[in-house]
Amino acid sequence: MTLSLQQRTALGRSRRKLLRRTDHAGWNPRHRTADPLKLLHASMRGRVPSLVDLKYQRMALSPFGFFRGAVPVMASDLALTPNTGILNQLCGDAHVSNLGAFAGLDGRVVFDINDFDETIPGPFEWDVKRMATSILLAGREAGAKNAHCDEAAATFLESYRLTIHKLARMSVLDIARYQVHRLQQASPIANIFTLAQRATPLHNLLALTEAIPAPHSEKSSSAKPHPVLAPQQRFFKSNPPVLTRVTGPTARLVLDALTPYIQSLLPERRHFFTQYRPIDVAFKVVGTGSVGLRDYCVYLQGNGPHDPLFLQIKEETHSAYAPYLASSSRKLHQGRRVVEGERAMQLQSDPFLGWTTIQGRDYLVRQLNDHKASVNLANLKSSALFEYAIVCGEMLARGHARSGDPAVLAGYLGNSPRFDQAVATFANQYADQTEKDWHQLLRSSRVKKSLAKAAPKPA
């Protein structure tokens, strides 16, 4: 039986008896049952060994860099705290850099949460706490005053709560169609749209590929056409370890994986994809948390060389939250888990979003860099930080409302700022904890060795 709006709101309100809103405050590291660096080390198992140092190097750049790569640490910490039991689809890695612009099916550039590697059904507040913490760390990295960072986190939390209440009063279809209209008014996002407009397929063609030298060129012996594909005019550049051209049996395995991938596409989109033909394959290093996982790119052509398509085929493992949740997602194809979580939370998704398998490993497939852009942390100072925090609140609330029940959420959150204030306290303490964990990482012998390898050699 479907409950009424009033009954669902009352259900959310009743959850306060299980976990008071004020109980979300505070973080005590003495409750930890695992060393954070050991959790990170365990998460590296199965990754490309030669890239593990690179991940540590990127995490060592700043506390926010550490935070981005340390989802297993925060997942373990959140699991130690009581939760509301109000479940919906989590982004899983909710932070300020995981919102961005990309091209929708109708060709317009849209802005939304755009990274779902850790997505899984779970307690809604885990996403809220991670996003609030990220705003504090991002603001600190940008050089904003601590008071401004605190106010920005409070602004995010208020924006989230008010948007949930707004969505709870809407019709079901209005929730499904809901768009955030303040995007162009927020200066950080206006800058993101400007960058995204430039990231066209042709721009990517020039950035990622190069022309095959003529036969008489001195380089012709080292830049031969792809051995498993017909000779073409352009192929991927090689800039190891970030971008490395792949040939031979590995390239064939990647191309063969496109056949099962086609079946994962929505039927009306298969027709368009089958009009492209593959040209070249590369291995690409992306992000921070994903470094070391296998990530391939395929360059395809549609109606000639001026119609390029770049696909990313990205390895997906179990969500870092999976060990702490009774979820059926452990049995799912992990690429499919990500696709279904993304489609649940986003207003529009990549038209070529799908999944495949290569040698027993699960992969997500999506377009690479199609009008994609994200925030520059250096710009998140003073008013820009507040503007961005408001949008983060609206976007996360919309994602939760699309994949969960906004009436239950609104009932739990209530109209007072008690939940906001409690999570703000947690986020502040957890941001401080992240900085301590980062310093612990810098002191570790493993990272010292990694940084020594990366250091420029004396002339």
Image (tube, grey):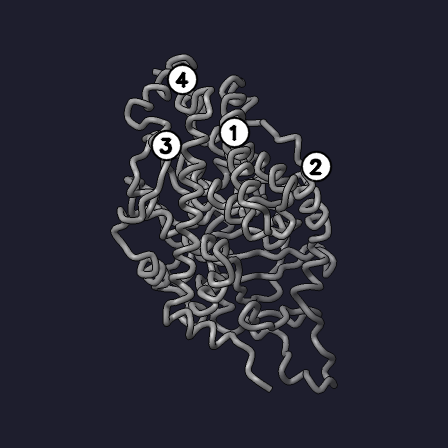
Q: CA distance from mark 4 to mark 1?
A: 19 Å
Q: Quadrant of residue 223?
A: bottom right
The residue labelled by disc 4 is: 9
What amino acid is found at the position of numbered circle 3 in the picture? Leu
Q: Which mark is residue 184?
A: 2
**Residue denoted by label 3:** 87
**CA–CA distance in space, label 3 to label 4:** 14 Å
Depicted 109 relative to depicted 7: above or below:
below
Q: Quadrant of residue 442?
A: bottom left
Q: CA distance from mark 2 to mark 4?
A: 33 Å
Front position among marks 3 and 1: 1
| Element class at badge 3 | strand
Q: Which residue is mark 1?
A: 158
- Mark 1 crowd level (few <14, some 14–19, many ≥20, 10 Å Cα): many
Q: Residue at x 64, y 42 (%)?
A: 382
Element at label 4: helix
Residue type (three-letter) at the residue carrying disc 1: Glu
State the residue at coordinates (45%, 49%).
117
Residue 336 makes an appearance in the image: no
Q: Earlier in the sequence, mark 2 or mark 1?
A: 1
The disc, 3 or 2, on the residue closer to the chain's N-terminal end is 3
How crowded pointer 3 is (Cα within 10 Å; few <14, some 14-19, many 20+) is rated as: some
Whether residue 242 is visible:
yes
Q: Nearer the viewer, residue 341 or 97?
A: 97
From the image, which quarter does the N terminus lie in? top left
